[in-house]
Image: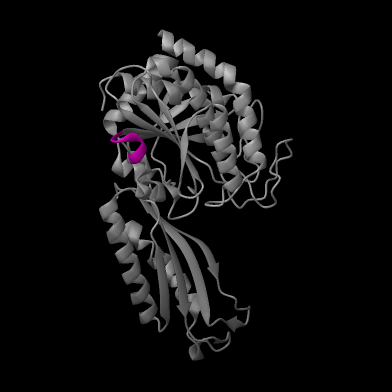
Amino acid sequence: MNEVSQEIIQLSKAVHEDVIGYRRHLHQNPELSFQEYETSKYIKAQLKKLTIPYEEVANTGVVGIIEGKKQGNGKTIVLRADIDALPIKEENETAFASQREGLMHACGHDFHTANLLGAARILQQLAHTFSGKVLLLFQPAEERVPGGAKAVIASGILEKLGGTISAVFGLHVSPRLDTGQIGLCAGRFMASADEFYLKINGSGGHAAEPNRAVDTIMVAAQLLTTLQQVVSRKANPLMPSVLTFGKIIGNGAANVIPDSVWLEGTFRTMDEEWRKQALKHLEEMVYGTVKMLGATAELEIKHGYPMLVNDISLSQHFKSSIIKHFGPAHLEDVPQWMAAEDFAYYSHKYPSVFFLVGIKNEQQRVQYGLHNAKFDLDEQAFLTAMQAMTISCLDFLENEHG
């Protein structure tokens, strides 16, 4: 372990309590996507205290700038944290539980934001050790399609502030990994996700006389099974694909066939060309099936985030940094994850790495999953997260990668 690594450890311990305070303040005051006004003000206030200059982006986003004081090649790296919360009513009874009815940081974005503020403090103290520039991207609206990442990229602010972007790093808390562990999946990591909204129109009637109706419940049931052929018969068996229906509403009764049925679902995969083909198959099957059964359909497909790809070369750099700093026992190769994340947009434009940080400590509490009303995390994980973010950043800026 070199001198910079030792300094990072000491600095992370020194700011740890403050970072916990940042997280608890944010946790008490969650805000939905593109409505993170107070969150944005809080981030800017903390950056001002640190005398870190910043610019606003995508309405509620913030980009801080730290410049290295050492002469060198002048690379620019982006460290990203998402800042939005979810429409979930918190069921925890901690002193810092959400104070906003029906809103909650149930996906760890309060942790991500606080962690980046902590990393900023460490990097500011170590500015004399590196050349180049670090952009601290506090990004709004990860939870809501089309996603804040798309707006950030479209704004051009990263290039405006940093010129050519050499790398983007981001992290996500993982309730499946123990505190102290870091997870990485090189290459394809997270899935694309598209939503579909379907209304089936038929002709309602008496349950005793289905021959006089066009039974939309039966049509919906047929579609539920027929559309699974997109995955079971159209997809390459080696390509991860998931088609899930999460909502079906008939609004009939035990003796009433309804005029219409509504269905909602998602399709996820890890190949952009197959994604296009699959959605085309889905559309053809919907209209073909309902026509065959005498009904009509109204289908809306909302295109969500693309798949997230961790750059192979940058992933190797990240692994090397983590092993050198923490030791090999703290790095886990994690499997692909069929969730979606708008960090994917950065991964399609810049060399990027998106890694996981373990926050599970079951000696402390039962660990609930993401998007659960009882989700909470082990705040000791900040030490791992801050160190992982800063050491990988500094190693990248100071070696020949990129």
Q: How is the image coloured?
A: one colour
Residue 68 versus residue 152 in the image, above or below: above
Give how far across and how far down residue 202 sits, in percent. Answer: 47, 83
User: Residue furthest toward the bottom?
Assistant: 212
Residue 134 versus residue 345 in the image, above or below: above
The region drawn magenta spans: 160-165
Give how far across and how far down residue 274 sits, in percent. Answer: 27, 55
Q: Is residue 328 visible?
A: no
- Residue at 58% of width from left, 35% of height from top? 45
The one nearer the camera, 174 or 383, is: 383
Count of labels in the image: 0
Give how far across and how far down residue 335 sits, in percent. Answer: 39, 36
Task: Please state, as top left, top right, bottom left or bottom right, where the N terminus lies in the image.
Answer: top left
Q: Is residue 79 visible?
A: yes
- Residue at 59% of width from left, 22% of height from top? 16
- Residue at 33% of width from left, 61% of height from top? 230
Task: Please state, as top left, top right, bottom left or bottom right, where the C terminus lies in the image.
Answer: top left
Was residue 237 drawn as part of the magenta stretch in this picture? no
Q: Is residue 33 left or right of residue 103?
A: left
Q: Is residue 147 left or right of residue 24?
A: left
